[in-house]
Amino acid sequence: MPRHADASGEVKPDAPSSTLEALRRPSVPRRRSIFAIPAPVKQLFNRFPLAMYDANELPLSAPRSRELLRLYVFADGGGDGLEVVSFNPSCLKYQAYLRFRNIQFRVVSSSNHASPSGSLPFLLPKSAGTSGDSQSLDPIPGNKLAKWADGQESKFEEPSDPRSDAYMALVDHSIRRAWLYALYLTSNFRSVIWPLYILPTSSNSLVRWSIGYDLRKAAEAELLKFSPTIDADLLYLEARDAFESLDGILGSDTWFFGAKEPGLLDAAVFAYTNFLLDPNYGSGWTDDWLVGALEGRDGLRRHREQIREQYFVVS
């Protein structure tokens, strides 16, 4: 190995060339991971580790418990009184059904934007206000309300008849499709839907226009699911036949299928007939073909009045 003498005269071996090269080569900093925590921050958290604190208490003005169920629907106002009646068929169907079941609840006027599922109605169960009672706060969407009501302690028995599904289909399909067309795709949209569903949502004209556009497109898309074209005459004729069939099966009975108490079919039919025959909304109909489909349906008219008198307060 080569050697050399230092300043003191002592002879030392020369450093290996590889070592000299390493000393001459400028140092290159090691690349840090993007997930690496900067040293100052790491030292800070080592000294003060993160901790989970208890949730803040509710304001004193906030309700600590809900003694009544809350049904969120489209309605003019809200409250505990029976006089609050939803003008939306999907909402009124379950509002009436819960009344039939003698389930006490508070009506809350709302909109689809407030719903966890994006549509009304939904039911918010009553809560004792305990933090551990999280399950009682879970909202119940409209399509599960009937099943939920069946699980409540009640002497009520849902009328059972093998024909009920067929007649319910008349309401959910034939009548509902004509309803969508008559309310959203005719001049009734401006005279009926606009003041009920759109004006209360915002004072901004652009927002109102956007909501109105979306509602009409949604109704059109729903109708086009069942037919490549929208035939107004066919829709109205099917709705008229549906009302005629329902009026015939009701006959002189108080409730459908001669039941002792009204059931889900009674609620579904009432949800449409109540609005169509309500004089408070009658002045808004510019296209009243669907209203005319109830002309001469004395059974359905009597059925509507019976429900209003027995389960709602008539103003």
Image: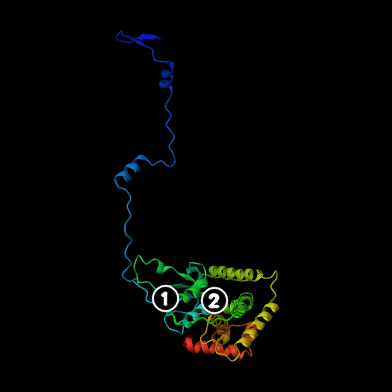
Point 42% across, 21% down: residue: 24
Q: 170 or 14, which is in the foreground?
A: 170
Image position of 133 with respect to 13: above or below: below
State the SS at label 1. Answer: strand
Residue 88 picture quarter: bottom right
Check residue 215 in the rendering and tell me which mark sits there, or answer none: none
Q: 218 or 177, which is in the foreground?
A: 177
Number of residues whose C-alpha sits closer than 10 Å to that of mark 1, classed few (under 14), some (14–19) or many (20 or more): some
Q: Earlier in the sequence, mark 2 or mark 1?
A: 1
For the residues labelled 2 and 1, say whether their Cβ atoms are less than 8 Å apart: no
Residue 69 picture quarter: bottom left
Q: Position of residue 202 (x, y in %)?
A: 50, 71
Residue 40 seen in the figure:
yes
Q: 48 or 139, which is in the foreground?
A: 139
Image position of 113 with respect to 266: above or below: above
Number of residues whose C-alpha sits closer than 10 Å to that of mark 2, classed few (under 14), some (14–19) or many (20 or more): many
The residues tagged by marks 2 and 1 sit, at their Cα atoms, a distance apart of 18 Å
Q: Position of residue 275 (x, y in %)?
A: 56, 83
Q: 70 or 11, which is in the foreground?
A: 70
Left or right of 50, for residue 101:
right
Residue 314 seen in the figure:
no
Q: Position of residue 144 (x, y in %)?
A: 50, 72
Looking at the picture, which amino acid does disc 2 mark?
Answer: Ser
Point 41% across, 41% down: residue: 36
State the SS at label 2. Answer: helix
Left or right of 38, for residue 283:
right
Residue under label 1? 69
Looking at the picture, which amino acid does disc 1 mark?
Answer: Leu
Residue 182 picture quarter: bottom right
Residue under label 2? 90
